[in-house]
Image: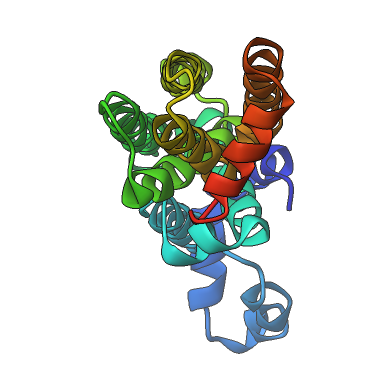
Amino acid sequence: MAVDNLHTVMNISKKWEKLLDTVNSMKDGATKSLIPDVRDVVTHTAMVSDVSKEIKSLKTQLDVQLMSDETTTFETKREEFFGQLKKSISKLKEIDAKLQDVLPTPVNAKESEENLIVKAKKIGKQLLDTTSKPELNQVDFNHFRKYYEHLIAFDKHLSLPNVEIQSTVDTSKAQVFEKVTSFCKEFANAGKDLGKAAEMLVIVKSFAENLSMFDSQINTDIDEALKKSKEKHGAKYITDLSMRLQTTDI
């Protein structure tokens, strides 16, 4: 039943609850024939109980960790998870807004919303702590993807206030490309030191391979760096660099 309709029904049932209780308690012959007609009517107390159970269920669904192995590994599971969170918080907020005056205790949907915001902000901090490191290893790349992708999904489905997710992911991206730019400069400054140049190129390439959300732009930066090196040192330099790279994991 729609929440608006439920509000109307609960108001009506509250008005007639005492009479309904009285009729249900009658056992004499004069009223016995009426009893089957009203015994199946849902009482106001039962309605309140059912709504309270629904509220408890929704709050339980919202009181979860925002990241799991499943949502980290599978994009579809991640989208489903945050999509369900959106449905749950929306339903709880609707009940809070429309049924509060007919319920005996506060719904307090704001508390559940604020708990989600706190958890999202924690992930945002973890993301920026990762990108603030001078260098990123494989574990850092894995963490970055995990935090970044969950924040993107959170923002897509929930868009809760005061989280500033877009600002956080933009900052993390900027920090990643600061590193990419720095390593590209070191590659350019390596000159004819093929060992150093190959080392820097491998590092930059690792960013593209591990951060697929940025791989197109990073690969463009790599191509531009190689183009400039070819113009500066000649085609043989690129050939020699390619041979050196064959001995690496790139």
Q: Is residue 241 at least partly visible in the picture?
A: yes
Closest to the observer, 69 or 62? 69
Q: Is residue 26 above or below residue 9?
A: below
Q: Residue 240 lies in what quarter of the image?
A: top right
Q: Where in the figure is residue 83, as x and y percent of width and height?
A: 64, 48
- For image coordinates 48% across by 54% down, the residue present is 248
Residue 88 visible in this rendered orientation of the protein: no
Q: List x then y, in percent, for residue 242.
A: 63, 43
Displayed quadrant of residue 49: bottom left
Q: What is the x, y in percent for residue 86? A: 59, 42
From what the image shows, is residue 88 above or below residue 99? below
Residue 117 vertical placement versus 56 (above, below):
above
State the residue at coordinates (42%, 60%). Answer: 68
Query: Is 218 or 72 nearer to us in this picture?
Result: 218
Tell me what residue is drawn at x 38 percent, y 30 percent.
Answer: 117
Viewer-proximal residue among 175 and 166: 175
Q: Position of residue 15 (x, y in %)?
A: 56, 44
All told, the count of numbered labels is 0
In front here: 195 or 185?
195
Can you say whether 182 is above or below 59 in the image?
above
Q: Is residue 104 left or right of residue 152?
A: left
